[in-house]
Image: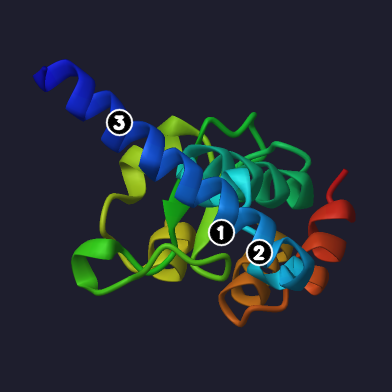
Amino acid sequence: MILKASSYLFNHTLKKTVIIRKKFKNIMHKQDAIYLDQFCPKIKNKNWRESINKLTKCKCIYCGKPSESLDHLHPMSKGGISSTSNCVPCCLSCNGKKSDSEVLSWYRKQNFYDPRRAMAIRAWQNDDLKLASVLLNYLN
């Protein structure tokens, strides 16, 4: 008897859902849609990482080796956030060496320092990704 009651409630709820969907089908707008990346943040995060890596052609912004991670220009431990203007592709070696140092003062001390890359890093910090991309393209 309990089984019948629960199946009735399920069917009743299902019928209500179908009726509501039919009723609101005509007034649904594109901006009201829920997309897959809203349910799966990993997909959205992956697309964001890929778009950042495209700007540097999958190379470390500091030394030019293949990028394997993202580094925060302004470290999270010092109040930095995960935004496009604060995250740059970099290799694991540079990411580990930089740690929570201030980016330009750390970069100037490296033996692979290049003033063109420093200009690109500063442009990236200022949220001018187009300029940063152009400056990095001149290096190749």
Q: Quadrant of residue 109?
A: bottom left
Q: Quarter of the image holding residue 79? A: bottom left
Residue drawn at the location 34% of the way across and 68% of the way down: 102
Mark 3 crowdedness (10 Å alpha carbons): few <14, some 14-19, many ≥20: few
Q: Are marks 2 and 1 in contact (CB under 8 Å)?
A: yes
* Between 138 and 5, the one nearer to me in the picture: 5
In the image shown, does 50 or 116 lie closer to the viewer? 50
**Residue at x 88%, y 43% (from the top left corner):** 140
* Residue type at the position of mark 2: Lys
Task: Give x and y (percent) for residue 126.
Answer: 61, 82
Distance in Å between CA atoms under marks 3 and 1:
18 Å
State the image coordinates of residue 90 (x, y, percent, origin top left).
54, 42
Find numbered disc 3 in the image and state the secondary structure of the residue it sits on. Answer: helix
For the residues bearing labels 3 and 1, Cβ distance under 8 angstroms: no
Q: Tell me the distance, in whole angstroms, between the alpha carbons under discs 3 and 2.
A: 22 Å
**Badge 3 or badge 1: first in the primary sequence:** 3
Name the residue beneath numbered marker 2: 23
Rendered view: 46 above or below 104: above
The amino acid at mark 3 is Tyr
Q: Report the disc number at residue 20.
A: 1
Tell us which disc is closer to us: 3 or 2.
3
Q: Which residue is mark 3?
A: 8
User: Neighbour class for label 1 at 10 Å: few (<14), some, many (≥20)?
Assistant: few
Choose between 64 and 54: the one closer to the eye: 54
Mark 3 or mark 1: which is in front? 3
**Residue 34 higher or lower than 15, as above or below:** below
